[in-house]
Amino acid sequence: MIHFSTHLASLAGLIFLAPLLIWSVWLTLKEGISQLKRLHSIPCSRCAFFTGDYRLKCTVHPITALSEEAIGCRDYESRSEPICPYSKQWKRLNK
Ligand code: SF4
């Protein structure tokens, strides 16, 4: 009888906690995707003033380059090809 009531309590707890767990995972995923979208909107890697050199990331705004503060930067100037950290151009610039 004791084992049955223990299992019943565990099952009730599981039924109560499962939706909370799913809701928590959903909120975390939603927040993560939102943050990822925000980080992808940083324009620096596509900007003509971005150097690709970690010592001086940008010749106009060296402090805010590659940060969330660069989103909506008024000095953004489009370049034909973005600098990718894994590209040969990046490696050549950072020798
Ligand atoms: S000018 Fe603005 S957008 Fe361009 S690299 Fe500098 S901070 Fe980023």
Image (cartoon, rainbow, N blue to C red):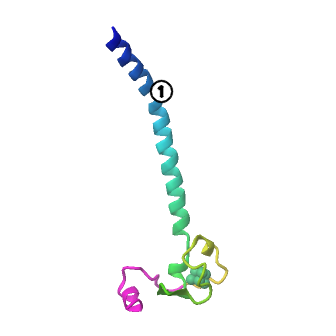
Indicate the quadrant where residue 11 lies: top left
Q: Nearer the viewer, residue 17 or 42?
A: 17
Residue that sits furthest to the top in the current view: 1
Can you give x and y, in whole percent of width and height, for residue 7 in the image?
35, 18
Q: Which residue is mark 1?
A: 16
The stretch in magenta equals 79-95
Residue at 55% x, 76% y is: 43
Q: Identify the amino acid type marked 1.
A: Phe
Q: Nearer the viewer, residue 75 or 21?
A: 21
Can you give x and y, in whole percent of width and height, for residue 56 in the image?
53, 88
- The local secondary structure at tag 1 comes to helix
Q: Nearer the viewer, residue 33 or 59?
A: 59
Q: Quadrant of the N terminus?
A: top left
Residue at 59% x, 84% y is: 62
**Left or right of residue 37, residue 11 in this image:** left
Provide the major secondary structure of the magenta segment: loop
Q: Quadrant of ligand 1?
A: bottom right
Q: Total of numbered circles in the picture?
A: 1
Residue at 37% x, 87% y is: 91
Work out whether 56 lies above or below 28: below
Work out whether 24 lies above or below 40: above
Can you give x and y, in whole percent of width and height, for residue 34 in the image?
54, 57
Residue at 40% x, 86% y is: 90
Q: Residues within 10 Å of mark 1 (few under 14, many from 20)?
A: few
Q: Quadrant of the C terminus?
A: bottom left
| Residue 27 within the segment the image draws in magenta | no
